[in-house]
Image (cartoon, rainbow, N blue to C red):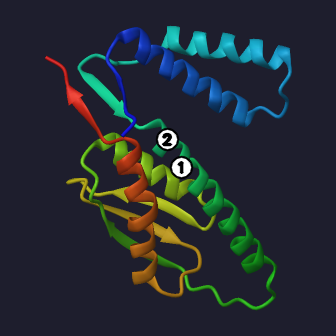
Amino acid sequence: MFLIVIRRKISKLLLIFLSLMACWFMFSAELYLDTFIIGIVMVISLLTIIPPRIKGKTFIINPIKIIWLLIVFFIELFKSNLRVAKDVLTPRLTFYSAFLKIPLNLKENFQKVFYANLITLTPGTLTIDISRDRNFILIHVMNVSDPAQLKKDLTNSFERLVDQAFPSTIQET
């Protein structure tokens, strides 16, 4: 298994910097030199104004599983976009929206938030709340025919992949 353990503060800061730059490029419409420079300035300014709290934990990540998670997410994103477009463009209103309480089997808070955000980013679904004990999430689904199957699909796809991509964090002493 190919795992990367990020222990040093510089490595963590670099990972945060690269993640923020990736977000900058995803949300910017153009990939030119001036956009790149503005992104670097914005990310460095952000990290200077709001320094990340990266003491106390060592993050273990599996880059191959992260890539696989992103591939599965983009496939699901594409399929969800098609489903939502079909539902919106269909003249008859046969929506079966529902609120679903989904149990969480993830250990780390980071994993749970990441999972909830993946659900929210998928069109037609929205994470409403994470329970106080952090064992359940409440989601709203725009159109669901079989709630039990949707719960099973979410657990078997996104939740399992998030757990594999970010296996754990280790408390530093």
* Residue type pointed to by label 2: Ile
Residue that badge 1 annotates: 68
Q: Which residue is drawn at 54% across and 18% down?
A: 17
Can you tell which quarter of the image residue 110 is in? top left
Q: State whether residue 22 is above or below residue 38.
A: below
Towards the viewer: 44 or 71: 71
- Tell me the residue that label 2 is attached to: 64
Rendered location of residue 113, percent (x, y): 39, 46
Of the 4 image quadrants, the one containing the N terminus is: top left
* Disc 2 secondary structure class: helix
> Please, is residue 167 above or below residue 121 in the view?
above
Percent from the top left, x then y, of residue 42?
66, 15
Q: Which residue is drawn at 55% across and 27% down?
A: 19
The x, y position of residue 12, in whole percent, is: 41, 18
Residue 133 placed where, x, y %?
A: 20, 54
Residues under labels 1 and 2: Cα distance? 6 Å
Query: Residue 92 sits in which quadrant?
Result: bottom right
Q: In this view, does 171 lie to the left or right of 100?
A: left
Q: Which amino acid does label 1 sit on?
A: Trp
Query: From the image, which quarter does the C terminus lie in?
Result: top left
Q: Is mark 1 on a helix, strand or loop?
A: helix
Closer-to-camera residue (31/69):
69
User: Do the residues bearing badges 1 and 2 touch, measured as CB atoms within 8 Å?
Assistant: yes
User: How many C-alpha atoms fall within 10 Å of the one at disc 2: few (<14), some, or many (≥20)?
Assistant: some
| 109 with respect to 171 (left or right) | right
Please tell me which residue is depicted at 59% across the width and 10% down the height of the picture. 45
Q: Nearer the viewer, residue 53 or 169?
A: 169
Residue drawn at the location 34% of the way across and 68% of the way down: 102
